[in-house]
Image: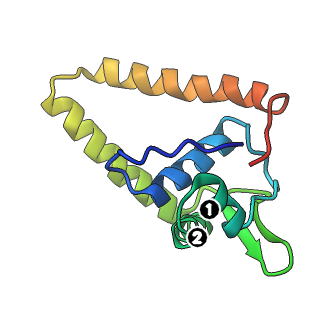
C-alpha cells in the first residue's frame, strides 16, 4: 500500500499516516496480523522524517491497532478490541460531531442516514478487501 500524504493539509502528517492505516484495516485492504514496513522504510517511501512515522506507529500501538516486536517489527494486531477507553473516545467524538451538525442545521435522520451509509460502505469494502488486500 502506498499511503497518500498531503503536505499542504493542516492535519499533521503522523495523524494522516495513522488515519490511513486505520482506514486500510477497516476496509480490509490491510489484513489483521499483516506486517507493516519498518519506520525507516515507510519514512523513505513517504519522504518524511523517521520520527514522524515513529510517532504514528506509537499512536497506533497505544490505541491497540498494531503491535511491535524488536525482532519482527510492527504488524497489525490479530484482534482489535472494543475497549472502554475507545468507547469513551467514540462518545466524545460523536458528541462533538452531533453538536457541529445541529449547529449547522442537520436533522437527526440525515445524520443517522449518513452514519449508516458510511458504516455500510466499510462493510462492503471489507468483503472486497480480502481479495484486494495490498502490502504497505
Residue positioned 79% across, 81% down in the render: 70
Are the residues tagged 1 and 2 within 8 Å (C-beta)?
A: yes
> Is residue 134 at least partly visible in the picture?
yes
Q: Is residue 122 left or right of residue 89?
A: right
> Is residue 65 at least partly visible in the picture?
no
* The image quarter in which residue 89 lies: bottom left
Q: Give percent across and percent down for residue 131.
A: 85, 28
Residue positioned 35% across, 49% down in the render: 93
Tell me how far mark 1 sits from mark 2, CA to CA: 5 Å
Q: Secondary structure at mark 2?
A: helix
* Between discs 1 and 2, the one toward the N terminus: 1
Q: Is residue 38 left or right of residue 9?
A: right
Residue positioned 13% across, 32% down in the render: 103
Q: Give percent across and percent down for residue 105.
A: 15, 23
Chosen colour scheme: rainbow
**Residue 102: mark in rendering:** none
**Residue 50: mark in rendering:** 2
Q: Give percent across and percent down for residue 65.
A: 65, 59
**Residue 43: mark in rendering:** 1
- Quadrant, the N terminus: top right
In the displayed structure, 9 sits above or below 53; it is above
Amino acid at each position: 500500500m502506498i499511503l497518500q500524504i498531503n503536505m499542504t493539509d493542516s492535519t499533521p502528517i503522523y495523524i494522516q499516516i495513522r488515519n490511513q492505516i486505520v482506514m486500510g484495516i477497516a476496509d480490509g485492504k490491510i489484513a489483521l496480523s499483516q506486517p507493516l514496513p519498518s519506520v525507516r522504510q515507510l519514512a523513505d517511501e513517504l519522504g518524511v522524517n523517521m520520527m514522524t512515522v515513529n510517532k504514528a506507529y506509537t499512536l497506533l500501538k497505544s490505541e491497540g491497532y498494531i503491535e511491535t516486536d524488536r525482532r519482527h517489527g510492527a504488524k497489525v494486531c490479530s484482534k482489535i478490541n472494543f475497549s472502554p477507553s475507545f468507547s469513551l473516545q467514540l462518545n466524545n467524538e460523536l458528541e462533538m460531531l452531533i453538536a457541529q451538525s445541529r449547529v449547522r442545521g442537520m436533522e437527526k435522520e440525515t445524520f443517522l442516514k449518513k452514519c449508516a451509509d458510511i458504516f455500510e460502505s466499510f462493510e462492503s469494502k471489507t468483503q472486497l478487501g480480502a481479495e484486494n488486500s495490498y502490502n504497505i
